Image: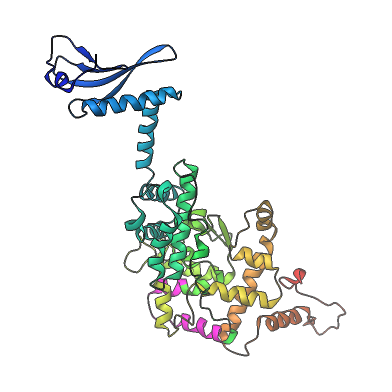
Amino acid sequence: MALSDMTARLAKPATKPYKLYDEHGLYLFVTPAGGKFWRLKYRWHGVEKSLSMGSYPEIGLDEARQRRHDARVLLAHGVDPNEERKRQEKAKILEKSSTLRVVALEFIEKKRKDGFSEKTLYKMAWFFSLVEKDLGDQALNDLMPYEILQAIRKVEENGHYETANRIRGFIARVFRYGVLTGRAATNPAAELGEALIKPKVRHHAAIIDPSAFGQLLRDIDNYGGYIGTRLALRLAPHVFVRPGELRSAEWTDVDRDNSVWKIPSEKMKMREPHSVPLSRQSLAIINEAHVRFGNYKLVFPARKSWRKPMSDATLNKALRTMGYRNEDMVSHGFRSTASTLLNESRLWAPETIELALSHVDDSVRGIYQRSQFWDERVEMAQWWSDYLDHLRTGIDILSPKQFAQRQRKAASRPIEPTTGYSSNVTMRVNFPGQSYR
């Protein structure tokens, strides 16, 4: 006989629990404490099982019967209602951990553990903050391409085209991570780049005219600001590393005895260790820095705190103080200057210059090349520093190619004996890079 709502409402607790049956396995379980709970009795592969369906009166009789009906439909399709409930509960938990906010923050934390710099992690968090209000609470699988595009275009509409494209790239990486961790089926941000305005390529401002660069070198020598800044600026043209790699240099990275600066992978943009051969001039600057800062951890500590490196803006501010505008020269431009003039010299293999700039080839061939070209890089580092010394004089300035030709001519000139005796012996000096012509 079917159960009535009045019977369920008037049911009183007893010394033992008891059941009030409805139809098709549904019953109300009454406990001695007065609790009333809906249960469904069913058989699964010959085994009797019970499915909890909520408490009374929160779940009324009609709703309990609807839940019974839904469970019986599952049984008719060969699905165990208990297992389906577990699956749905897991899905809810997964959905809560699958919002863009949760996955993005998890992705950033993973990159922190991977050793990414604080500056890179900050940029990632900033990119996400620009779309968090619109997209943060939505599950990855619920986000549609047009929704992501709409949020990014709010940034684009303000003329920040490069930032908009980088936000898209970050979101695409988060989705790719979500796919790999089972919280996203697709990556809707992957192809959105075609819908965004492409930013104009902006190269780092750099002085590539030899005479003008020589003037810059003299201005750096005469810079009257903080000695740590002056030393860093003096070294930068010789080693042409990235500004962040220069600022974060530590004494433990510098092998002064063997004239090499070994930059660990966590300080490199490409996350690959990089070795920098030090010319005599570079080593002299580093030794001068060691006299002043050798007791500290950092080669070029900040002015206000020796525990911290210089800020991103320190070197550029120094260039501005010397009268160089942002469109004239930036600290990153020393790399462009070196690349341009070294290539103009026609002395060095392009691969050697690229490796010196730490444009790393991750292939097996790239690993081989890093070893293969080391000797040439050592020669090139010394030749480059010698050329910088020539530019610094400001006298009879030569192009890189002319300077190389002058050196070659000087190296091939016979050295006459000083004793007054004639000699048919001709002495030659090996010319750096000569074997690579």
Q: Residue at x 40, y 30 (%)?
A: 87
Q: Quadrant of residue 158?
A: bottom left
Q: Nearer the viewer, residue 394 or 148?
A: 148
Q: Considering only vertical position in the picture, is 43 above or below 427?
A: above
278 lies left or right of 50 = right
363 lies left or right of 412 = left
Q: Quadrant of residue 226?
A: bottom left
Q: Is residue 132 visible?
A: yes
Image location (x, y in percent) of residue 108 = 41, 51
**Magenta region includes residue 228:** yes
139 lies left or right of 351 = left
Residue occupying the far front of the picture? 1
From the image, which quarter does the N terminus lie in? top left
From the image, which quarter does the C terminus lie in? bottom right
Q: Residue at x 24, y 17 (%)?
A: 2
Q: Nearer the viewer, residue 319 or 361?
A: 361
Residue occupying the far right of the picture? 424
Q: Considering only vertical position in the picture, is 142 above or below 341?
A: above
Q: Residue at x 58, y 80 (%)?
A: 389
Q: Is residue 115 visible?
A: no
138 lies left or right of 7 = right
Q: Quadrant of residue 250?
A: bottom left
**Magenta region includes residue 375:** no
